[in-house]
Amino acid sequence: ALQTLLMSSQELEKAGLLNKTKIAEGGRKLRKNWSPSWVVLVGNSLVFFKDPKSQTPSSWKPGNSRPESSVDLRGAQLHWANELSSKKNVFKLRTVTGNEFLLQSETECLIKEWYDTIKSVIEKLDRE
Ligand code: I3P
């Protein structure tokens, strides 16, 4: 799926491992369930993949890179959200459809890079 995205001539902006939990779906609050996720920013979307390290050897097959979910960044809101977690370096992403995610890294400079990059994509889309 990642290859499909790349081949559709969208620009791969960033990729890396972050801790992720979804906290709302369509405006309805969900119970937190933090897990590591490969996060890929491509075009106007943030795409989430399961962390390969958290899978069993038998469940992992080359080319088996179907995304878990993806988020359209158009109209999305991004805020630092350290008050929403006991973890440090947390931001909240809210989509126009009312889905909310927390993303976190123990590495402060890394989460700042993600925040700035996502912010700039959202602002670019706001200007279109
Ligand atoms: C939650 C779990 C989360 C924690 C959350 C707890 O408990 O410990 O890690 O979020 O806190 O409710 P459970 O496993 O029983 O669902 P943080 O790590 O982000 O603090 P919260 O309810 O205060 O959000």
Image: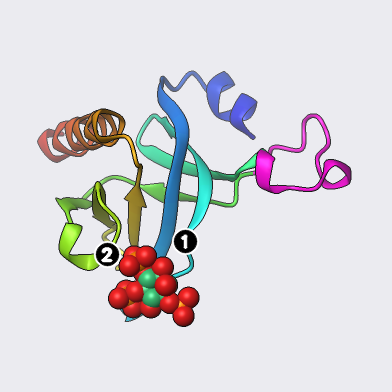
Q: Quadrant of residue 118?
A: top left
| Quadrant position of the N terminus in the picture | top right
Residue numbers of the magenta segment: 53-66
Which residue position holds label 2? 85
Image point 32% across, 34% down: which residue? 107
Mark seen at residue 34:
1
Q: Is residue 65 magenta?
A: yes
Horizontal and vertical percent position of residue 109: 24, 28
Q: CA distance from mark 2 to mark 1?
A: 11 Å
Q: Which sits in the foreground, 93 or 72? A: 93
Label 1 near label 2: C-beta < 8 Å? no
Q: Is residue 36 in sight in this rendering?
A: yes
Disc 2 marks which amino acid? Ser
Q: Residue 81: give x, y in percent of width and height.
A: 18, 57
Rendered location of residue 103, percent (x, y) = 35, 50
Visible in this render: residue 26?
no
Give the quadrant of ligand 1: bottom left
Q: Is mark 2 within 8 Å of ligand 1?
A: yes
Would you say 12 lies left or right of 109 here? right
Q: Give the left or right position of residue 43, taking residue 48 as reference.
A: left
